[in-house]
Image (cartoon, helix red, strand yellow):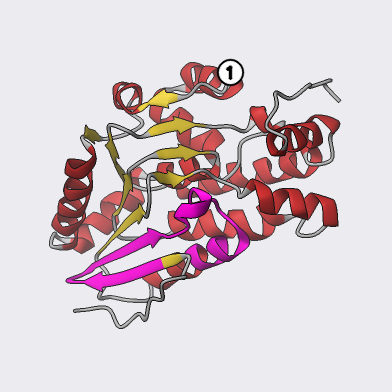
């Protein structure tokens, strides 16, 4: 079945449904596919629609341009801080978005074709399979911005790499190459750029043609969505507290001014 979704050139999320495979393409390449409000809401709506459509038997999340998703759009966030608008977006927008992804019953594949950072990395981790290009990289970026994790990363990353290694990666904000991510179990496969894109599509198509009822049951048994959702709620509470700190304000200002931050621990 072909999709009847009408995509436009300026749509932040492109959608295509073919032969049981729903392909979602994050489409803000000029902004490194940063998660602005429009994109967060579009992703949530797309994720929520999956379980209501029996024609969808697998989902592929990919991106336009050379980045997968760099997380929060910092320019938008700086404007929100200045105008004191949308101060609780983690509770109201990020958490419902990631919960909707975790609640998808069919298999979800992420094609990570470039940098995945912050909530962008969390988005990939919430998928069931991750196929990475050898140009991909992974960075939490939260402590660099004076923030805690969000979108369930405090639960998702330890599941993949164990608590000690997750603590090391998150506290020291270590950037992982694609090969390091493969070695740690963060991704399933690493291929060169073109081969990764082809492999991700082939894997998603294989899943879409498989025994969907069995896949749904296996996913329900293996993935603990409730634990990740709970972690995301606790993270959101921490983000509300941290968003008012001098360290976070300094982190945003230094990012916009392209200089190292001067943290004071306040």
Is 57 on the left or on the right of 5, as rendered?
left
Q: Residues within 10 Å of mark 1 (few under 14, many from 20)?
A: some
Would you say residue 35 sits in the magenta stretch?
yes
Closer to us: 257 or 94 = 257
Q: Is residue 144 above or below residue 92?
A: above
Q: Position of residue 262 (x, y in %)?
A: 78, 21
Residue range corresponding to the magenta coloring: 14-43
- Kindly identify the residue that appears in the image at 37 percent across and 55 percent down: 64
Quarter of the image where the N terminus is located: bottom left
Measuring from the top left, give residue 75's x and y in whole percent.
67, 49
| Residue at which label 1 appears | 172
Instruction: State whether residue 247 appears in this view.
Output: yes
Q: How many marks?
A: 1
Identify the residue shown where x is 82% and y is 21%.
265
Specify whether 264 is left or right of 117: right
Percent x, y of residue 99: 52, 56
- Within the image, what quadrant is residue 83 found in? bottom right
Q: Quadrant of the C terminus?
A: top right
| Residue 78 is covered by the magenta coloring | no
């Amino acid at each position: 079945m072909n999709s009847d979704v009408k995509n436009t050139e300026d749509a932040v999320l492109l959608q295509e449904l073919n032969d049981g495979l729903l392909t979602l393409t994050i489409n803000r390449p000029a902004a490194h596919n940063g998660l602005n409000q429009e994109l967060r809401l579009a992703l949530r709506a797309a994720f929520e629609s999956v379980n209501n459509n029996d024609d969808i038997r697998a989902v592929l999340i990919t991106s336009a341009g050379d980045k997968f998703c760099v997380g929060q759009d910092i320019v938008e966030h700086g404007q929100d801080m200045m105008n004191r608008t949308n101060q609780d977006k983690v509770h109201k927008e990020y958490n419902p978005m990631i919960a909707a992804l975790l609640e998808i019953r069919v298999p979800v594949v992420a094609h990570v074709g470039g940098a995945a950072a912050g909530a962008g990395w969390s988005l990939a981790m919430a998928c069931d399979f991750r196929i990475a290009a050898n140009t991909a990289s992974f960075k939490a970026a939260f402590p660099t911005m004076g923030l805690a994790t969000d979108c369930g990363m405090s639960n998702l990353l330890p599941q993949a790499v164990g608590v000690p290694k997750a603590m090391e990666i998150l506290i020291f904000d270590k950037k992982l190459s694609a090969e390091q991510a493969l070695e740690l179990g963060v991704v399933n496969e690493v291929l060169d750029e073109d081969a990764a894109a082809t492999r991700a599509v082939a894997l998603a198509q294989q899943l879409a043609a498989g025994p969907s009822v069995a896949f749904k049951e296996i996913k329900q048994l293996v993935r603990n969505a409730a634990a990740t959702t709970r972690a995301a709620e606790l993270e959101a509470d921490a983000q509300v507290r941290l968003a008012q700190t001098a360290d976070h304000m300094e982190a945003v200002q230094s990012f916009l001014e392209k200089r190292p931050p001067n943290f004071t621990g306040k």
